[in-house]
């Protein structure tokens, strides 16, 4: 048996029995996936995935960062280079290399997600290894050639009710247009990720501003025209189902400058005359400006701070961003968010979802903030903590102050399409295990636990993200 039916449940029999009952009630609920990075082209074109390596290995930084840490070159895994230099093109060779290193994932969430996909989608009962790599490859490759494994069919098989992709304001959303015109009933929406035009340190920032003006018809060399460009683009994104914005800033710092100071700051960043302090202050001001626009248009706002992105400069220069070299940093929320919260923290028609890569802030800062301000909600354990232990710690450290209902359930935040059901299954099992402990220690009645399990698996995410 590749995956055990009681995985992640408590060892103690009474608690395990409760967890089983709770899980039975939520196991088959539809998936709400309100934040992620799957490619909208998949759903638009509905073409077969080309091969197992392209499906599992090449797009998944959880996989290739681990292999890279053990000396496997990214070129050997078929990861495209920025300059088009030669990389491994044989998908079977890439798959064999991955299989030979599968032991590296022992005990990791990646292993749990992969084994879940291998067992539930392809019927494997034997663990992947160098010895059975070709047998794995052949079975998966044959399945991918069938209609049942095309993106839309998998969408329906996974019971995805709604999924959000994430696009830059500069994206024309042509794939979303194809989806909309196709008549297919799957709900795939976009989300507004303005980093390329709000982060002065983003590569090509000044050229991005020019393009931003061209596609919106606004004068993005002026502060007022720049803000109007955001409003118009947000409206455009909402036409394609967007209900949320997403902000991946280095810190959670916010600011509330006077109009004159904001105009002067924008003048410096838009002309390339900004210092590092100016760049950070501009990002801070733009979080507050985005919150103001969310109050106007109702879009849910997500902040994902605390990552030192592209830490490996060699990998960044050769392969680009999002290549597994983003590292968590210490993050302040109490002082950083205060300018924004002074303006909008008491707004009941604003939903601001906070994520963190700094677990030390859970009980000290995030839970008390979300447990007070009506506008704030806590996003789930994310990225490096999107794991059974990280999910459990999140519940242990936030529930005592924020409760369950100041959180937003679970989102999977992935590019790896076949891991989506596995990630939601892990989250549901961990939450059921946590609730079972509250029941067996007589802190919660079982009927309440059933309601909570449903809310955490489905309702909270759907309502928070207005899906």
Image (tube, rainbow, N blue to C red):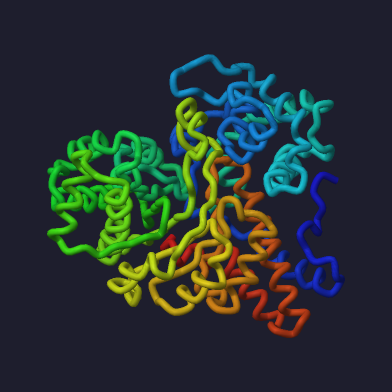
- Does any portion of residue 403 appear in the rendered image? yes
Q: Does 125 appear above or below 77? A: below
> Residue at 60% of width from left, 32% of height from top?
55
Foreground residue, 53 or 150? 53
Give the quarter of the figure containing the C terminus.
bottom left
Residue extending farthest top: 86
Residue 357 located left or right of residue 440:
left
Residue 15 placed where, x, y %?
80, 73
Task: Pinpoint residue 346: horizontal percent, then vertical percent.
Answer: 34, 77
143 lies above or below 463: above
Report whether 112 appears left or right of 467: right
Q: Is residue 366 above or below residue 42?
A: below
Task: Name the foreground residue: 443 vs 365.
Answer: 365
Report the number of numbered marks.
0
What residue is drawn where x is 47% and y is 32%? 316
Residue 239's x, y, as percent? 30, 50
Say which residue appears at 15% left-offset and 51% top-offset: 223
Q: Residue at x 49, y 28 (%)?
A: 319
């Amino acid at each position: 048996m590749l995956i055990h039916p009681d995985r992640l449940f408590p060892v103690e029999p009474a608690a395990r029995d409760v967890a089983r009952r709770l899980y039975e009630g939520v196991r088959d609920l539809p998936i709400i996936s309100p934040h992620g990075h799957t490619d909208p082209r998949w759903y638009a074109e509905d073409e077969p995935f080309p091969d197992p390596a392209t499906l599992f290995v090449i797009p998944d930084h959880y996989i290739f960062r681990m292999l890279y840490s053990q000396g496997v070159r990214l070129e050997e895994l078929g990861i495209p280079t920025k300059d088009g230099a030669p990389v491994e093109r044989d998908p079977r060779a890439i798959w064999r290399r991955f299989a030979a290193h599968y032991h590296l994932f022992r005990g990791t969430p990646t292993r749990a997600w992969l084994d879940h996909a291998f067992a539930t989608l392809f019927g494997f009962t034997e663990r992947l290894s160098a010895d059975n790599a070709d047998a794995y490859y052949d079975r998966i490759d044959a399945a991918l050639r069938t209609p049942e494994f095309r993106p839309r069919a998998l969408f329906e098989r996974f019971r995805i009710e709604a999924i959000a992709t994430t696009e830059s304001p500069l994206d024309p959303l042509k794939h979303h247009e194809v989806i909309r015109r196709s008549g297919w009933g799957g709900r795939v929406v976009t989300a507004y990720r303005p980093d390329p035009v709000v982060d002065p340190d983003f590569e090509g920032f000044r050229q991005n501003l020019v393009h931003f003006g061209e596609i919106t018809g606004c004068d993005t060399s002026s502060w007022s025209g720049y803000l109007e460009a955001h409003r118009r683009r947000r409206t455009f994104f909402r036409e394609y189902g967007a209900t949320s914005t997403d902000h991946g800033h280095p810190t959670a710092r916010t600011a509330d400058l006077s109009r004159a100071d904001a105009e002067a700051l924008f003048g410096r960043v838009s002309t390339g005359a900004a210092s590092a302090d100016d760049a950070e202050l501009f990002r801070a001001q733009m979080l507050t400006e985005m919150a103001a626009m969310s109050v106007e248009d109702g879009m849910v706002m997500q902040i994902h701070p605390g990552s030192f992105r592209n830490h490996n400069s060699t990998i960044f220069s050769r392969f680009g961003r999002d290549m597994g070299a983003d590292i968590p940093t210490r993050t302040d929320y109490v002082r950083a968010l205060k300018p924004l919260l002074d303006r909008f923290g008491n707004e009941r028609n604003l939903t601001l979802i906070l994520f963190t890569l700094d677990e030390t802030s859970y009980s000290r800062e995030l839970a008390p903030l979300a447990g007070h301000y009506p506008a704030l909600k806590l996003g789930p354990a994310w990225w490096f903590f999107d794991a059974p232990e990280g999910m459990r710690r999140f519940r242990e450290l936030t529930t005592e102050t924020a409760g369950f209902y100041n959180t937003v359930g679970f989102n999977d935040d992935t590019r790896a399409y076949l891991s989506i059901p596995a990630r939601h299954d892990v989250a549901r099992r961990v939450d059921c295990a946590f609730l079972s402990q509250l029941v067996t220690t007589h802190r919660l009645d079982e009927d309440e636990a059933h309601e909570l399990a449903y809310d955490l698996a489905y309702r909270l995410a759907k309502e928070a993200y207005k899906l």
